[in-house]
Amino acid sequence: MKGILLILILTLSGCASYFDYPSYYLNSSGYKAIAVNPFAYLSNSGHAENKRLRAGKSGYMIYSDNPDRRYHSVSSQNCTSAYSSQSCANKAAINRCILKENYCVLAWVGNNYVAEGNVANFVRNNSSLVARWRENQRRRNSGITLNDALIAIGRDMENNPVFNRSNKIKVCDFKNFYGEIIRGDCSKSSIRKDGEIYWKVDS
């Protein structure tokens, strides 16, 4: 039972290190870094997630006090560990990011926030890629807007008896004083036609 509890605590602490412990990163000593997907940064411009990143609360983190040790190795002949130099910490953060993302840049180098400059450089150096991404974002947003409009039109049609068969007008017989019968809307008690009044016939 104690073994299961220990595994659960280690698992939760490993997961939480990604988001929930900014002080662990910012207050940790030694070499450290955080990487981020530049497209996620652009998508979240002005949103809470970028504020979390600026506070050191999100991103792919490498720091010596991180309880999640799975991402601390660096595949580089010049790095014995992620903490042997700042360069090695930077590589470890990028390597951790690349496990999940297609594109990665450094957001933090040590205690220096560098996301804005590195994302700007990424945009400048990959202008055609970023332009395609922005066009896809625009199309996706336009698609959502069109979809919302179609849903609204559909709701209007459901509530309109012209389009909704379940709300069709019920037809009844109406008779005038001379016994002539015409058909009309059952919701009315009488109908006037050519100056004559026709009264609804009880069925």
Image (cartoon, rainbow, N blue to C red):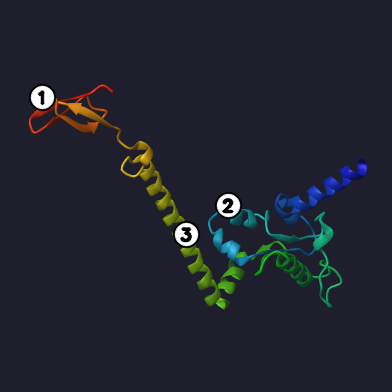
199 over 140 or under it: above or below: above
Residue 109 appears left or right of 47:
right
**Contact, mark 1 vs mark 3 (Cβ under 8 Å):** no
Q: Nearer the viewer, residue 118 or 147?
A: 147
| Residue at (50, 64) in percent of width and height | 137
Few, some or many residues within 10 Å of mark 3 (<14, 14–19, 20+): few
**Contact, mark 1 vs mark 2 (Cβ under 8 Å):** no
Secondary structure, mark 2, is helix
The type of residue carrying mark 1 is: Tyr
The type of residue carrying mark 2 is: Ala
**Disc 3/disc 2 C-alpha distance (Å):** 20 Å
Tag of residue 178 = 1
| Residue at (79, 71) in percent of width and height | 88
- Say which of marks 1 and 3 sits in front: 1
Does label 1 or label 2 sit earlier along the sequence?
A: 2
Extreme residue in the front direction: 179
66 over 117 or under it: above or below: above
Residue 167 appears left or right of 5:
left
Extreme residue in the left direction: 195
